[in-house]
Amino acid sequence: MLSVVVVGGGITGLAAAHRATELARERGIELDLKVIEGRGRLGGTIATERVDGFLVEAGPDSFLSEKPWALALCRRLGIEPKLVRTDDRFRKVFVWHHGRLHPLPDGFQLLAPTRLLPFATSSLFSWRGKLRMAADLLLPRGGGDDESLGAFVRRRLGREALERVAQPLVAGIYTADPDELSLAATMPRFLETERRHRSLILGLRRALRATPQPGTSGARWSLFVTLADGMEALVRALAERLPDSSVALGQRVASLERSAGRWRLATADGVRVDAHRVIVAGESHGAARLLRSVDPTLATLLGEIEYAGAATVSLGYRRAEVPHPLDGFGFVVPRSEGKSILAGTFSSVKYPGRAPDGHVLLRCFLGGALDARVLEEDDAQLLSRARSELREALGITAEPVLSRIARWPASMPQYRVGHLARVETLERHALKLPGLHLAGGAYRGVGIADCVRSGEAAAEAALTP
Ligand SMILES: Cc1cc2nc3c(=O)[nH]c(=O)nc-3n(C[C@H](O)[C@H](O)[C@H](O)COP(=O)(O)OP(=O)(O)OC[C@H]3O[C@@H](n4cnc5c(N)ncnc54)[C@H](O)[C@@H]3O)c2cc1C
């Protein structure tokens, strides 16, 4: 009998536990599996609530289909028919600039334009800014080993491209300061594009011609997908496939030690569990605390990965009381605008079934590495911030018919410059501790698809003799 304990019942831990049961079945291994979760519920930052006909996502609202692991998991779980794609009639994203929402020009690929006409006629950029971006067509290759995303965009496309597009789009994903964020660890595709094609714009255009883009006709899934019943449906489907009584809720693992070739865990309530293998699938700051006495160097490396917090404020309105046409997926807000909202999603436009008839659901994303103090505010303050900024952006003065606030302190790992080198070093250290496996968004990708991959890889390593 092989005993495996998974610490943490977020998507990483659940994907690990599920993969372990799949592998045990395939390989005829007798498995004693335990998932120990500190909270009273599974899912970690994934939390869906149905209320008064609204479907509110307190944490992630979708996952990337481009990275195949979450999609493949949904297929194996038999929930692929429940996946829903974005309503691509409204693919537009707006950028808040000088008090107004400007559409991001068609063909803008996160950092750089790929289509000339929409870019040239865009109201978002000044002529000087447009010319500076076009200079990318002529500039030589540059950069060093690990460059920050901010330095890279400034160098290739100029300050305006960074301030008005790259910074706010990146804040909406990584909640990070672009001058601290490692490009190699977060968006290696752009580095590779410069390496191969020199010009980012030319390279992205060539890549576009070579492959059909998700969301365009012919592609099965849009770039982002979700589940009809919300992201928690993925958590439920995973939990249903775990062996009976393998999940312990409301129990926080407080210590971890190695004893006689096995791992010994103790919960904060004093429950002891011995196991051949341990998959630590919680945040890396928690893993650092657990491993302090086992391997202080590893613990220090883990502790050096910083986290930022974030909050979401979801607001339901009567459609008639929202003056804006809501003809897009939402908007992002450059830091230079001095607002609290990092991004606003028109949730019920982006996905079907998020609001009852005649209503809309909007969601504001606040906090992040550049605005940590927002998380310290009480509900009334957060609500009033979100409402006053929505009034400015969308002209909404009405009282919301629904409001929900969620805080996620220290939940978003920050991949600073040097992140990949740190992860390689800590992975080398972890290899010296047989039976210990680290998984989660702290290491090689922050999104749900990356977490699924990381959890499944940890299970494969744990079940390989
Ligand atoms: C507001 C927000 C919006 C997001 N939006 C998206 C999105 O749209 N798309 C996307 O792909 N990603 C998104 N993300 C990121 C995504 O949610 C995470 O990458 C992913 O859910 C992390 O899963 P995880 O299991 O690694 O960690 P978590 O979800 O943090 O789960 C870790 C779990 O481990 C438990 N735990 C930790 N230590 C212990 C211990 N010692 N003992 C017992 N239990 C322990 C915790 O209680 C927690 O439940 C978002 C994140 C946030 C916060």
Image: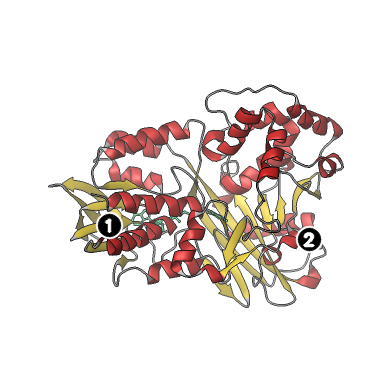
The percent position of residue 293, horizontal first and vertical second, equals 24, 40
Residue 398 or 187: which is nearer the viewer?
187
The quadrant the N terminus occupies is bottom left
Element carrying mark 2: loop
Residue 383 or 300: which is nearer the viewer?
300
Name which residue lies at 21% across and 47% down: 257
Q: Is residue 336 visible?
A: no
Q: Amino acid at mark 2?
A: Asp
The percent position of residue 449, horizontal first and vertical second, equals 50, 53
Of labels 1 and 2, earlier in sequence is 1
Q: Picture quarter containing residue 312?
A: bottom right
Name which residue lies at 31% across and 59% down: 23
The correct choice, above or below, for 55 with respect to 109 in the image is below
Q: Amino acid at mark 1?
A: Val
Name which residue lies at 85% across and 39% down: 120
Name which residue lies at 86% across and 33% down: 127
Question: Number of callouts in the render?
Answer: 2
**Residue furthest to the front:** 210
Neighbour tally class for label 2: few under 14, some 14-19, many 20 plus, Cα within 10 Å: some
The correct choice, above or below, for 246 with respect to 374 in the image is below
Q: Which mark is residue 327?
A: 2
The percent position of residue 163, horizontal first and vertical second, equals 71, 37
Position of residue 1 in the picture relative to residue 194 (left or right): left
Residue 220 or 152: which is nearer the viewer?
220
Q: Picture quarter containing residue 288?
A: top left
The correct choice, above or below, for 178 with respect to 259 in the image is above
Q: Picture quarter containing residue 37?
A: bottom left
Q: Which residue is mark 1?
A: 5
Quote the CA–CA distance across marks 1 and 2.
Answer: 47 Å
**Residue furthest to the left:** 260
